[in-house]
Amino acid sequence: MPTLEVDRLSKRVALPSGELTILDGVGFSIAKGDTVAIVGASGSGKSTLLSLMAGLDSPSSGTVTLDGEPISSLDEDGRARVRSEKVGFVFQSFQLLPSLTALENVMLPLELRGDRDAFAPAQAILAKVGLGQRLDHYPRQLSGGEQQRVALARAFVTRPSLLFADEPTGNLDTHTGQAIIELLFELNADAGTTLVLVTHDEHLAERCHRRIRLDSGRLVQE
């Protein structure tokens, strides 16, 4: 059974000038442990597709099935449950809470799902990403590359079955971005996670097993 199935997925929004179609009948499946890049020009629907696959938004039509569970038909509480149990995220803008230390940011998803011991796994994965000496630093005290390392640690600490990364190097310089990508693929291989990566960087896309290309909301190449 595929980890993720997308079937005839569409997203339309109403505008004063009429209805805008952002995604139009997109469909594909992703196997467990696969690495997939979603590519396309700006405005092609990549980030909208990611939001729908992750259950952050609801489609206008079509279905998204994660590990056999049709998340597109769940209410927000149901989708939030699935995300907490099975999904990790890495964003371009890091999305760290500024009032929490690096350690507290990584502990947070474990605490939210009710784990009794959040400290030990958070400490261990921060050491793994090279931040074992920066546990008590706040995001403002960390460089962009260090903040994205914290974000990677937070994404993998729950051992998700599926990880979504949306332009993970978009706010980083070339050298730092390359180091983050190497770390992302290393962590992903170690954990056996299914990786879905949204990027406009063709070199990054080439690191993945598959590429899914969107153009004006439609699947044009796989």
Image (spheres, helix red, strand yellow):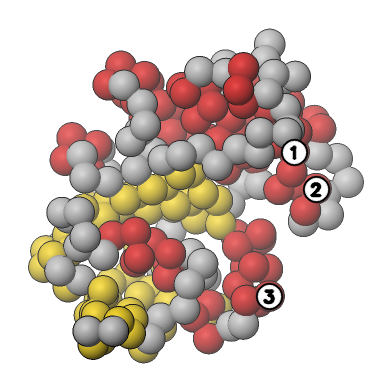
Pointer 3 residue: 77
Using residue 151 as the reference point, say whether residue 60 is left or right of it: left
Using residue 132 as the reference point, say whether residue 148 is left or right of it: left
Pointer 1 residue: 107
Identity of the amino acid at label 3? Asp
Residues at circles 3 and 2 in contact by the CB criterion of under 8 Å: no
Mark 2 Cα within 10 Å, few/some/many (few <14, many 20+)?
some
Mark 1 Cα within 10 Å, few/some/many (few <14, many 20+)?
many
Looking at the picture, tell me which residue is in the foreground, 74 or 160.
74
Location of residue 144 in the rendering, given as x and y in whole percent from the top left corner = 47, 23
**Label 3, label 2: how far apart the Cα atoms are:** 17 Å
Identity of the amino acid at label 1? Met
Residue 171, compared with residue 30, is above or below; it is above
Q: Residue at x 31, y 21 (%)?
A: 173
Residue 189 visible in rendering? no
Q: Which residue is drawn at 50% across and 30% down?
A: 148
Number of marks in the image?
A: 3
Location of residue 54 in the rendering, given as x and y in whole percent from the top left corner = 48, 64
The image quarter in which residue 20 lies = bottom left
The image quarter in which residue 85 lies = bottom right
Residue 199, compared with residue 28, is above or below; it is above
- Mark on residue 111? 2
Q: Earlier in the sequence, mark 3 or mark 1?
A: 3
Residue 108, compared with residue 127, is above or below; it is below
Residue 176 visible in rendering? yes
Looking at the picture, tell me which residue is in the foreground, 63 or 142.
142
Q: Is mark 1 on a helix, strand or loop?
A: helix
Location of residue 92 in the rendering, given as x and y in whole percent from the top left corner = 41, 40
Location of residue 137 in the rendering, given as x and y in whole percent from the top left corner = 69, 19
The image quarter in which residue 8 lies = bottom left
Residues at circles 1 and 2 in contact by the CB criterion of under 8 Å: yes
